[in-house]
C-alpha cells in the first residue's frame, strides 16, 4: 500500500514529522494522552496485520489508514498547543486486548478498526467516530454458493475473538459454524487453504485483504431482509475512560482532518477507491443506545 505523505501544514511548520519506534513488550504509558504528547513521547495502538488499515511492513515501518489518522491527530494536538511533535512508539493491539491495554495504561490511545459500541464505551472513552463502515463477507473467488447472508447456514465462518462481527454472528446466525482466531490474517490464510467457507468483519478490512491478493477473493455485502446494511460500524479512537480533555482534543483534530481533505487523501492512499467507507461525525455518539 502507498504510504500517505499528506500532513497538516501547521503541524509540519511548528513541529515537523514525529519519529517512530516499535514498542517493546514492557513499554507503558501512564500519564495520559495530552500529558504524554506534551512530554514528547506517546504510545499508540493499532493492528499489525491489516493491509490498508494497520500494517507492520517488512522493513519495520507502519502504514495504513488507521496509522495515518493516529499520526495526524497526535501531530495536530501537539501543534495546536505549541508543543513539539512527540516520538511515537507503536504497540500491536489485537481486538480482544484493546480495552485492557488502555485501562492498564500500556497505550495512550488506540486506532485499530475500533468500532464504538455500548459495552466498550463503559470502560474507555472514544474520540470520533471518524468513519462508518458495514459488516461484509470475504469468500474465495471461485465460490458460487455464498451470495447473501442466508447462504451461510451450515457453513464454516471465521472471525476474530473479541470483535463486534463475531458477536453479531453468534447472536443472529446460530446455524453458522463459527471459528474464532486471534488475528484476521489467520482467518485469511484459513480461507485461502479452504479450511473455512467465508470470513466476516468490516468491509474496510476485507477490501484491504482482497486488494492484497488480486484474483483470489471476493467481498460480498451483508444486508438485512429490508435491504439495510447488516451492521453499522463506527470507528473511533479509544483512550482512557473519563479523559474528557483528551477526547475533546481528539475530536477537534478529527474535525480538522475531515474539513481539510486529509481524511479523503488517507483513504485514497490506503484503500484504493475506499469502497464501504463514509466519513464519520466526530463527537456524535447518538447511535449508541
Image (cartoon, rainbow, N blue to C red):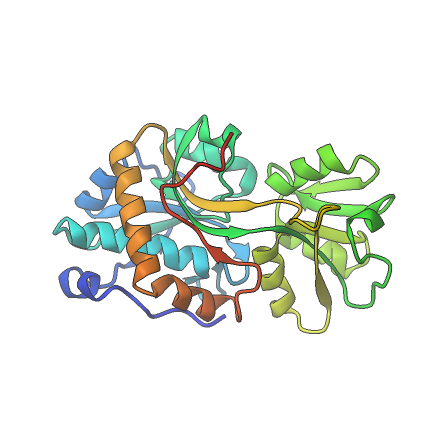
Rendered position, 272 above or below 24: below
Q: Is residue 52 visible?
A: yes
| Residue at image location 39% in from the left, 41% down from the top | 284
Which residue is nearer to you in this view: 101 or 209? Answer: 209
Left or right of 35: which side holds 158? right
How far across and down, in percent of the image, does residue 165 sit? 64, 42
| Residue at image location 83% in from the left, 63% down from the top | 143
Left or right of 149: which side holds 2? left
| Residue at image location 76% in from the left, 40% down from the top | 178
Q: Is residue 33 visible?
A: no
Farthest-out residue, left: 82
Rendered position, 203 above or below 45: below
How far across and down, in percent of the image, does residue 108 sit? 33, 40
Residue 68 position by quadrant: bottom left
Residue 204 position by quadrant: bottom right
Q: How many marks?
A: 0
How far across and down, in percent of the image, does residue 94 sit? 53, 43
How far across and down, in percent of the image, does residue 176 sit? 81, 41
| Residue at image location 75% in from the left, 57% down from the top | 191
Amino acid at each position: 500500500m502507498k504510504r500517505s505523505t499528506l500532513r497538516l501544514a501547521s503541524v509540519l511548520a511548528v513541529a515537523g514529522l514525529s519519529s517512530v519506534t516499535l514498542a517493546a513488550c514492557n513499554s507503558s504509558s501512564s500519564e495520559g494522552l495530552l500529558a504524554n504528547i506534551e512530554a514528547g513521547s506517546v504510545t499508540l495502538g493499532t493492528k499489525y496485520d491489516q493491509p490498508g488499515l494497520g500494517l507492520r511492513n517488512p522493513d519495520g515501518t507502519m502504514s495504513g489508514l488507521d496509522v495515518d489518522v493516529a499520526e495526524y491527530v497526535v501531530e495536530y494536538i501537539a501543534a495546536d498547543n505549541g508543543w513539539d511533535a512527540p516520538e511515537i512508539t507503536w504497540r500491536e493491539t489485537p481486538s480482544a486486548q484493546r480495552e485492557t491495554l488502555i485501562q492498564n495504561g500500556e497505550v495512550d490511545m488506540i486506532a485499530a478498526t475500533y468500532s464504538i459500541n455500548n459495552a466498550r464505551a463503559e470502560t474507555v472513552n472514544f474520540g470520533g467516530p471518524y468513519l462508518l463502515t458495514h459488516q461484509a463477507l470475504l469468500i474465495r473467488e471461485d465460490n458460487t454458493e455464498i451470495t447473501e447472508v442466508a447462504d451461510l447456514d451450515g457453513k464454516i465462518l471465521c472471525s476474530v475473538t473479541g470483535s463486534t462481527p463475531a458477536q453479531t454472528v453468534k447472536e443472529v446466525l446460530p446455524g453458522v459454524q463459527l471459528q474464532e482466531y486471534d488475528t484476521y490474517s489467520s482467518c485469511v490464510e484459513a480461507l485461502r487453504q479452504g479450511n473455512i467457507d467465508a470470513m466476516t468483519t468490516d468491509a474496510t478490512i476485507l477490501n484491504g485483504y482482497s486488494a492484497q491478493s488480486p484474483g483470489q477473493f471476493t467481498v460480498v455485502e451483508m444486508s438485512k431482509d429490508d435491504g439495510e446494511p447488516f451492521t453499522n460500524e463506527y470507528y473511533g479512537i479509544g483512550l482512557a475512560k473519563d479523559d474528557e480533555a483528551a477526547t475533546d482534543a481528539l475530536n477537534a483534530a478529527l474535525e480538522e482532518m475531515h474539513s481539510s481533505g486529509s481524511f479523503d487523501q488517507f483513504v485514497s492512499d490506503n484503500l484504493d477507491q475506499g469502497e464501504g467507507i463514509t466519513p464519520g461525525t466526530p463527537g456524535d455518539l447518538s447511535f449508541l443506545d
